[in-house]
């Protein structure tokens, strides 16, 4: 069944905004920073910029976010935390399995954690919590997937956004990071497809980021 969104942006934005996002993220993973900014600074600017674009193009989206924040708040936060824990367990098993069957998996995983080298943990946590985690979901799922589900159908929109989310990580040339992006994109996309709650997936993404990068990392 097609889900029509009265606040969907004009047709031109269905191509321009995703292409802009793809360009920004591919360049980010290729260069791991721009100018005097490191990876985390560039990632923060990219996400913030895309959120501003999304909210400017789709003005009614702000109202939808406000409504989401006012209804069943505790329940959505709890579901976000639980879903993040479930995804972490999936990655825990995937981490072990990949190291058994893929000779370069450990090195590729280590390269992902290399993004943290020389960067304050406090800074990473603040950027993850305040911008990166929630901002990615505001853009990818709350804005783009909502629009593409209205245009291509629930399953089509979910799969297309998940595919694009995976593809933009290809600039890293890191098979483990690309596989992780595919799993996360499908998982958070399904959560949005199922619950239609930007807040819940923002909590899920942010808490998962903290688990994987800060609290219980896989780089052992």
Image (cartoon, helix red, strand yellow):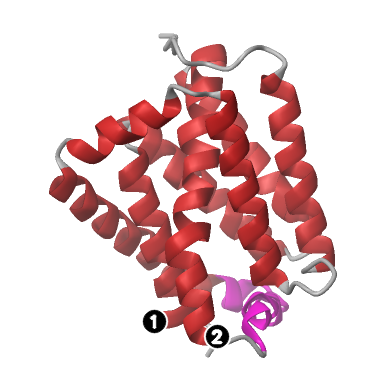
Percent coordinates x, y for residue 131 in the rendering: 50, 58
In this rendering, position of residue 152 left or right of residue 68:
right
Disc 1 packing (10 Å; few <14; some 14–19; many ≥20): few
Q: Is residue 195 visible?
A: yes
Q: Quadrant of the N terminus?
A: top left
**Where is residue 20, by image quadrant?**
top right
Q: Is residue 114 magenta?
A: yes
Percent coordinates x, y for residue 70 in the rendering: 19, 37
- Give the magenta range: 98-117
The residue under label 1 is 215
Q: Looking at the image, is 95 positioned above or below residue 163? A: below
Q: Residue at coordinates 75% horizontally, 27% vertically from top-left?
A: 16
Q: Is residue 128 magenta?
A: no
Q: Circle 2 — which element?
A: loop
Query: What secondary structure is the magenta-colored segment mainly?
Result: helix
Question: How many numbered circles does the render carry?
Answer: 2
Q: Residue at coordinates 55% horizontally, 40% vertically from top-left?
A: 140
Q: Residue at coordinates 53% horizontally, 46% vertically from top-left?
A: 185
Residue 219 circle label: 2
**Where is residue 68, by image quadrant?**
top left
């Amino acid at each position: 069944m097609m889900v029509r969104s009265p606040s969907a942006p004009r047709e031109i934005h269905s191509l321009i905004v995703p292409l802009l996002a793809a360009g920004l993220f591919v360049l980010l993973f290729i260069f791991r920073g721009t100018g005097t900014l490191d990876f985390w600074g560039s990632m923060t600017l990219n996400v913030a910029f895309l959120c501003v674009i999304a909210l400017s193009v789709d003005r009614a989206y702000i109202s939808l976010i406000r409504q989401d924040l006012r209804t069943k708040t505790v329940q959505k936060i709890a579901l976000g935390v639980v879903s993040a824990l479930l995804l972490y367990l999936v990655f825990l098993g995937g981490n072990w399995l990949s190291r058994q069957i893929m000779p370069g998996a450990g090195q590729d995983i280590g390269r992902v954690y290399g993004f943290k080298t020389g960067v304050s943990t406090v800074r990473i946590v603040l950027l993850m919590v305040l911008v990166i985690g929630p901002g990615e979901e505001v853009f990818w799922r709350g804005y783009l997937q909502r629009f593409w589900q209205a245009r291509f159908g629930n399953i089509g929109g979910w799969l297309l956004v998940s595919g694009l989310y995976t593809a933009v990580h290809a600039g890293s040339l890191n098979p483990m990071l690309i596989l992780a992006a595919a799993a996360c994109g499908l998982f958070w996309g399904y959560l949005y497809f199922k619950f239609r709650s930007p807040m819940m997936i923002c909590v899920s993404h942010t808490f998962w980021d903290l688990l994987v990068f800060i609290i219980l990392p896989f780089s052992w």
